[in-house]
Image (cartoon, rainbow, N blue to C red):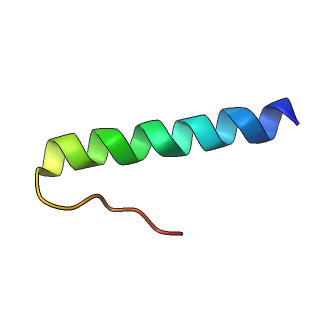
């Protein structure tokens, strides 16, 4: 279960970083 939590956290952080770097829309792929 911890692996899933870590993966989710990294996905969220990745989305935030992409959003901040791009500055327009987050490249989120659900």
Can you tell which quarter of the image residue 17 is in? top left
Q: Is residue 22 shown left or right of residue 26?
A: left
Q: Is residue 14 shown left or right of residue 6?
A: left
Q: Residue 12: percent from the left, percent from the top?
A: 48, 43
- The number of callouts visible is 0
Quadrant for the N terminus in the image: top right
Q: Is residue 7 shown left or right of residue 3?
A: left
| Residue in view at x 73 percent, y 36 percent | 5
Q: Residue furthest right?
A: 1
Q: Is residue 13 shown left or right of residue 19?
A: right
Work out whether 29 lies above or below 12: below
Can you tell which quarter of the image residue 13 is in? top left
Q: Residue 7: percent from the left, percent from the top?
A: 66, 41
Work out whether 17 lies above or below 28: above
| Residue in view at x 19 percent, y 41 percent | 20
Q: Residue furthest bottom?
A: 30
| Residue in view at x 80 percent, y 35 percent | 3
| Residue in view at x 58 percent, y 35 percent | 9
Q: Residue 15: percent from the left, percent from the top?
A: 38, 48
Quadrant for the C terminus in the image: bottom right
Q: Residue furthest left?
A: 23
Can you tell which quarter of the image residue 25 is in? bottom left
């Amino acid at each position: 279960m911890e692996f899933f939590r870590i993966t989710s956290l990294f996905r969220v952080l990745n989305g935030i970083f992409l959003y901040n770097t791009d500055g327009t829309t987050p490249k989120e792929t659900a």
